[in-house]
Image (tube, rainbow, N blue to C red):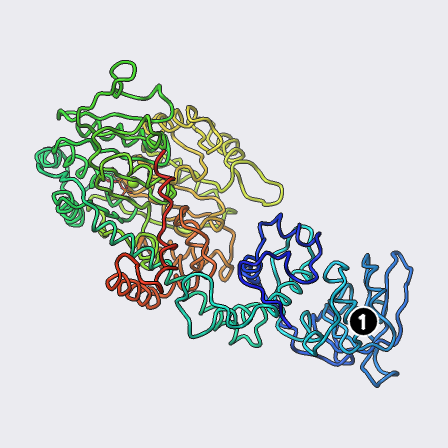
């Protein structure tokens, strides 16, 4: 019955596809059979349960088998086509009236005497059981069934039906797949197309690419994920694809790890003098965890292999200082060290910090951002660069060829998750295999570390400096602001500063969230005598800068802000953070925000405002936050609450779409995939064996992207 469709066959080869349909698919980037099928259902509707008409109840969404006793156009406030139906063989029993509005083609498909399978929501109107625009299939009339599929296929004539299979129900009476809408194509049409494509692929067609789960044939699993016979079947099919995806991802990681370990690098730590000088000048000692991380980094940098290390630590654990030590090792060894930060505010803050910390040394520190006015001491005269070993702090501007640091020995990437993989690579490519240190903003779950950074060695700062003021986190209802306001007043009298954070910039009509601009007006009214400023992402870099430096300098009492303060801002005198509509933020984001306080010796207060009641979704994460300050614990909880796919989205911008994210939560699966990948690479490091050929495409990274 099939004409041997292959995964890469263009859909135009599909018998009976109309040009309009082909165009709609093409517009959505769906050209081949495989692309059509890789759009897996977004959800399913269980239409298996079939009720008798007399069992129907108002408001239920159900599947029913009915017999058509009459069908006609009706006119009331609207014109519609109505079929009067009931249980087959019971002409005097209960009636169900099916009504189709604006769907004139239905009239051509239905006739008295047919048996239908119908799916829709029952509504009682004027004492009658009705269903508006139900999905339906003709169950026994061959010609009608034929017409129906034609209609679903956009009116294109179909070859005459040959087998019973052609009348199997697709849209009712089973677990029915629901797809994300496509402009210009009805969901039902898409479903019918998928069905027909699946019928036309020879079952023993090999899986496209490397298949990590060959015991469950790919196309069988594809069929099962679109049209699962049971929930169990669906789960199995998803797991099969998840396994495949997990393996491919872990294979890439294993490959990268091997590459990294085989990459010759530079010896960038020959002398600790600058580090020792810095540490001796600090008013505090490094924590044990910081010391351990510096040692790990030192060892990597002193070796001729390229360092590829991830530095993970909680907010405020002092990652920047560890990174600075690494940079001083490089400078002490005659190399330049560069740190790239995601925002101008952060880059400048690092720059000022480093200048202050290194004021008594002869280490040169420079800043390079998109805004040349702030650039310092890099260009001597037109076109000529000063190549003295130094520390350079910059933003994305460092990625441009003309700005790339000379003599780069160490590349540090702050807030790694704000950069894509390509940006990271491009930055690293600016030197002769420089050592690389990447830093995350907050801890991420262990499985994600393995997935996103599996090729890196990891150093963890799991301890906060001892001098930290305590942070108290409380959950309050915004209806009781009075006490909070007098508390704020008292703290400001004592010289402290306050952050007020809101989810959105401007009042949106649809969501009643307080916004930063409205907040500014509100707080100015409450505290007319205080200095209150605004910080949000839509301000110009200059305005942001000005607000930030006023606040850092203590010339502003309250900073009303959006999440731009989330990223690494460090003002030790600020000890109160008020978060409006706190339940609208993610858990890790709230933790990151809270990390802006508790940075000095003062006791700090994070006040989460939310009207979410006990048991509301959104409330649980706030309670977790009140309970613990441990970022590693919070990351795992966040992962549990949000699920892997969602969490991945915010943890990393550079990783491709994950279609079956369930494996991300499964450490055992990841380890297993990892072991398999290692074993393959161990046996065949260059992937020369023919069976490994498909694996080569997985690791064939686009090196052209790195060259400009
Ligand atoms: P994060 O890890 O969030 O980037 P930072 O590096 O910004 O944290 O450090 C937060 C603050 O803690 C900075 O003001 C830094 O100078 C200070 N700090 C770092 N290490 C120590 C330490 N061992 N003892 C006391 N304070 C420290
Ligand atoms: Mg930081």
Looking at the rendering, in which quadrant would you find the C terminus?
top left
Q: Where is residue 505 shown, x and y percent of the image? A: 52, 36
Q: Secondary structure under badge 1?
A: helix
Compared with 599, 331 (above or below) is above
Q: Is residue 611 left or right of residue 308?
A: right
Residue under the point 29% across and 37% down = 429
Q: Where is residue 691 shown, x and y percent of the image? A: 36, 65
Compared with 164, 296 (above or below) is above
Q: Where is residue 379 shown, x and y percent of the image? A: 27, 18
Residue under the point 40% across and 64% down = 663
Compared with 352, 44 (above or below) is below
Residue under the point 81% across and 59% down = 103
Which sits in the foreground, 57 or 176?
Answer: 176
Does residue 634 appear in the picture of this structure?
A: no
Q: Where is residue 51 shown, x and y percent of the image? A: 72, 79
Does residue 297 appear in the picture of this structure?
A: yes
Which sits in the foreground, 154 or 611?
Answer: 154
Label 1 neighbour load within 10 Å: few <14, some 14-19, many 20+: some
Looking at the rendering, in which quadrant would you find the N terminus?
bottom right
- Residue tagged by mark 1? 144
Quadrant of the image where one finds ligand 1:
top left
**Identity of the residue furthest to the bottom in this view:** 89
């Amino acid at each position: 019955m099939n004409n041997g469709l292959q995964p890469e066959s263009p859909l135009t080869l599909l018998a009976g596809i109309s040009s309009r349909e082909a165009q709609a698919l093409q517009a959505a980037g769906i050209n081949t059979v495989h692309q059509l099928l890789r759009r897996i259902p977004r959800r399913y509707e269980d239409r298996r349960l079939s009720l008798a008409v007399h069992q129907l109840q108002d408001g239920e969404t159900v599947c029913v088998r009915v017999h058509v006793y009459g069908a006609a156009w009706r006119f009331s406030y609207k014109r519609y086509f109505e079929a009067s139906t009931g249980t087959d063989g019971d002409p005097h029993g209960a009636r169900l009236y099916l009504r189709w509005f604006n769907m004139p083609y239905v009239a051509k498909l239905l006739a008295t005497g047919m048996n239908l399978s119908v799916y829709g929501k029952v509504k009682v109107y004027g004492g009658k059981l009705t269903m508006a625009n139900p999905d339906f299939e003709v169950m026994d009339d061959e010609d009608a069934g034929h017409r129906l599929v034609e209609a679903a296929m956009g009116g294109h004539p179909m070859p005459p039906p040959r087998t019973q299979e052609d009348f199997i129900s697709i849209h009712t009476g089973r677990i029915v797949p629901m797809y994300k809408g496509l402009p210009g194509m009805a969901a039902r049409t898409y479903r019918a197309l998928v069905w027909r494509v699946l019928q036309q692929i020879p079952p023993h067609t090999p899986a496209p690419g490397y298949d990590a789960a060959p015991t469950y044939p790919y196309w069988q699993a594809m069929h099962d994920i679109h049209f699962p016979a049971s929930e169990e079947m669906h789960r199995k099919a998803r797991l099969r694809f998840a396994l495949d995806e997990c393996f491919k991802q872990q294979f890439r990681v294993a490959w990268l790890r091997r590459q990294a370990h085989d990459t010759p690098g530079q010896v960038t730590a020959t002398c600790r003098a600058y580090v020792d000088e810095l540490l001796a000048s600090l008013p505090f000692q490094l924590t044990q965890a910081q010391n351990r991380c510096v040692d790990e980094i030192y060892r990597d940098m002193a070796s001729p292999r390229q360092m590829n290390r991830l530095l993970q630590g909680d907010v405020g654990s002092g990652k920047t200082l560890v990174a600075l030590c690494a940079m001083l090792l490089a400078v002490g060894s005659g190399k330049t060290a560069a740190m790239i930060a995601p925002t101008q505010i952060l880059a400048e803050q690092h720059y000022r910090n480093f200048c202050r910390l290194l004021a008594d040394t002869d280490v040169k520190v420079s800043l390079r951002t998109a805004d040349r006015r702030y650039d310092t001491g890099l260009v001597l005269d037109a076109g000529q660069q000063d190549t003295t070993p130094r520390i350079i702090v910059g933003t994305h501007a460092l990625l441009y060829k003309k700005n790339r640091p000379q003599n780069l020995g160490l590349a540090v990437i702050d807030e790694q998750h704000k950069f894509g993989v390509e940006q990271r690579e491009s930055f690293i490519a600016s030197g002769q295999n420089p050592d690389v240190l990447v830093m995350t903003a907050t801890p991420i779950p262990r499985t994600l570390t393995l997935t996103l950074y599996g090729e890196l060695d990891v150093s963890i700062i799991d301890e906060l400096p001892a001098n930290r003021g305590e942070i108290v986190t409380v959950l309050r209802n915004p209806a009781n602001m009075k006490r909070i306001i007098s508390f704020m007043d008292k703290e400001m009298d004592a010289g402290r500063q306050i952050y007020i954070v809101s989810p959105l910039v401007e009042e949106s009509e649809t969501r009643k969230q307080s916004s930063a601009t409205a907040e500014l007006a509100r707080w100015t009214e409450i505290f007319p005598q205080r200095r209150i400023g605004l910080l949000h992402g839509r301000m110009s870099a200059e305005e942001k800068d000005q607000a930030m430096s006023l606040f850092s300098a203590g010339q502003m009492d309250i900073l009303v802000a959006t999440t731009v303060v989330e990223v690494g801002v460090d003002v030790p005198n600020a000890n109160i953070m008020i978060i409006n509509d706190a339940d609208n933020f993610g858990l890790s984001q709230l933790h990151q925000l809270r990390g802006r306080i508790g940075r000095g010796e003062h006791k700090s207060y994070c006040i989460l405002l939310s009207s979410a009641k006990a048991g509301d979704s959104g409330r649980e994460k706030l309670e977790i936050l009140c309970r613990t300050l441990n970022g590693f614990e919070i990351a795992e909880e966040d992962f549990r609450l949000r699920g892997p796919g969602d969490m991945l989205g915010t943890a990393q911008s550079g990783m491709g779409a994950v279609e079956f994210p369930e494996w991300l939560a499964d450490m055992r699966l990841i380890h297993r995939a990892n072991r398999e990948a290692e074993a393959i690479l161990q046996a065949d490091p260059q992937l020369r064996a023919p069976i490994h050929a498909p694996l080569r495409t997985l690791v064939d990274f686009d090196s052209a992207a790195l060259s400009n």
